[in-house]
Each structure stands twice: as structure tokens, then as C-alpha cells.
Image (spheres, rainbow, N blue to C red):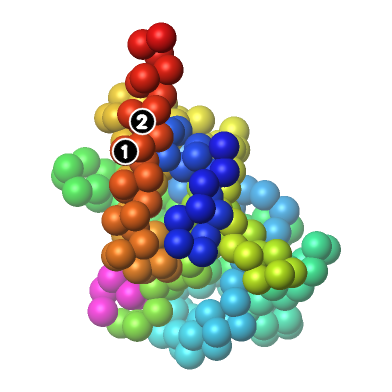
Amino acid sequence: MILQIGDILISSDLLTESFCCDLDACHGACCVEGDAGAPVTLDEVMQIEDSLETVWTDLSASAQAVIDRQGVAYTDQEGDLVTSIVGGKDCVFTCHEDLTLDDGHTVGNCCLCTLEKAYRAGRSKFCKPISCALYPIREKHFSDGTVALNYHRWEVCRPAVALGHERQIKVYQYLREPLVRRFGEAWYKDLCDAAEEVEKMNNDKNEL
């Protein structure tokens, strides 16, 4: 089912499907799997370039070589502007290290974003591309200016679906922060209201 929140079209999957990243299971695989980089805007490319000196020493030698050769982004086979990658899959801005989560336990050899790492350490003003922050939501732009949000299913995220079910967290709830960053607090409140309506409608159907 497709809903419209403000001037944005959304798939109802965002409101009904469960999701919560399980780094113990995936170790951040979404940053290194696939065959293309993360979608970026021209404005984000400029912000990444401004942050490059800050994160340069955090990058692998291979990543540095790719950036020296083609820059921080390139146009993929579908004509989309995406972050540069190493070895046909790894985003150039990834690094691997142990990560201590909010509950105090540590995930070993986790794939992290050097851009986000610098941002959270107060060394940079740019966090990371909004396409990364929103995943598993994918943003699609149509020629008439319409924007649509869809839920992208991926095998590497199956543990996140299971954990979302366990913790009763929906996709839109898990991604509250980036959704607000992208569309604003008022829009997100309308999204939550729509989620309540969809849940009520589904409950009414189940009672029939």
C-alpha cells in the first residue's frame, strides 16, 4: 500500500515491518557488500571533500589510492552519483575496529564509517550521506519531482529484521533520527500518526 505524507510517497512497509540493526550478527556488512557505493548528492560530495583531510589518515591505503585516482564519488552504471569503492564493493570511507555499544558490550571487527566516526568525535561537521543513514529505506526521485520512500530487503539484514521483531521496533521508529534530519519533525509526526492509523486498520481487519 502506498501512502502520502505531505508531498512524499511512502510504502506502508515502513510502518508495518520490523527492523533494528544487529551489529553482533552483521558487523556492519551493508557498508562493504554490494557492487556500488552509497548514493550521494552533489552537495554531499562537496561536504565529503571538505571533510577529506580530517579522515584521510583513517582510510586504508587502497581507499586513498582510489580517491586519488577518481575522487570521492563516481557515476555508476545506472547513472547515479555514488561514493567511490575499493575492490568492487567496499566504500572507501569504511574502517574496521572494535565497537562498544550503548549497553556496554563490544562488537569485534565492526565495519564503521570514518566520516561518522569523525563527526561523533567532534572533528567534522558532516556525518555521512543521508542514503546511508536512512538504510534500509531507499529514496527514489521521479522526473516530475515526486519523492518516494521504499523499504529495501536484503539478505545481510535478516538479523536486523529478527531483532526488530524481538524488540517490537518498526522501520520508521528505528530510523527516527535520519528521517527527522531529512524531512523535519513535523513531517515525522505526521508519519507516526499515519502509522497509528495503519495499525488500527490492520487490527480491525484481524478482528473480522
SS type, badge 2: helix
In the rendered structure, does residue 10 fall within the stretch colored magenta?
Answer: no
From the viewer's side, name the closer residue of 68 and 3: 3
Q: Residues within 10 Å of mark 2 (few under 14, many from 20)?
A: some
Task: For residue 161, say whether it is visible.
Answer: yes
Which label sits on residue 47? none
Judge left or right: residue 26 versus residue 166. Answer: right
Q: Residues within 10 Å of mark 1 (few under 14, many from 20)?
A: few
Residue name at image x 42 percent, y 39 percent: 15
Judge left or right: residue 146 versus residue 74. Answer: left
Q: Name the residue under label 1.
A: 196
User: What amino acid type should be assigned to the residue bearing mark 1?
Assistant: Glu
SS type, badge 1: helix
Residue 184 position, x and y percent, is: 35, 68
User: What amino acid type should be assigned to the residue bearing mark 2?
Assistant: Glu
Q: Quadrant of the N terminus?
A: top right
Up-down: is 166 above or below 151?
Answer: above
Residue name at image x 26 percent, y 79 percent: 122
Residue 163 figure quarter:
top left
Q: Give the range drawn in magenta.
A: 116-122
Q: Mark 2 points at which residue?
A: 199
Residue 120 position, x and y percent, is: 28, 70
Give the overall secondary structure of the magenta segment. helix
Up-down: is 69 above or below 20?
Answer: below
Residue 93 position, x and y percent, is: 52, 68
Q: Which residue lies furthest to the left in this view?
A: 104
Instruction: Compute the Cα span from label 2 to label 1.
Output: 5 Å
Q: Do the residues labelled 2 and 1 touch (CB within 8 Å)?
A: yes
In the rendered structure, does residue 117 fall within the stretch colored magenta?
Answer: yes
Residue 107 figure quarter:
top left
Residue 67 position, x and y percent, is: 65, 79
From the viewer's side, name the closer residue of 161 and 176: 176
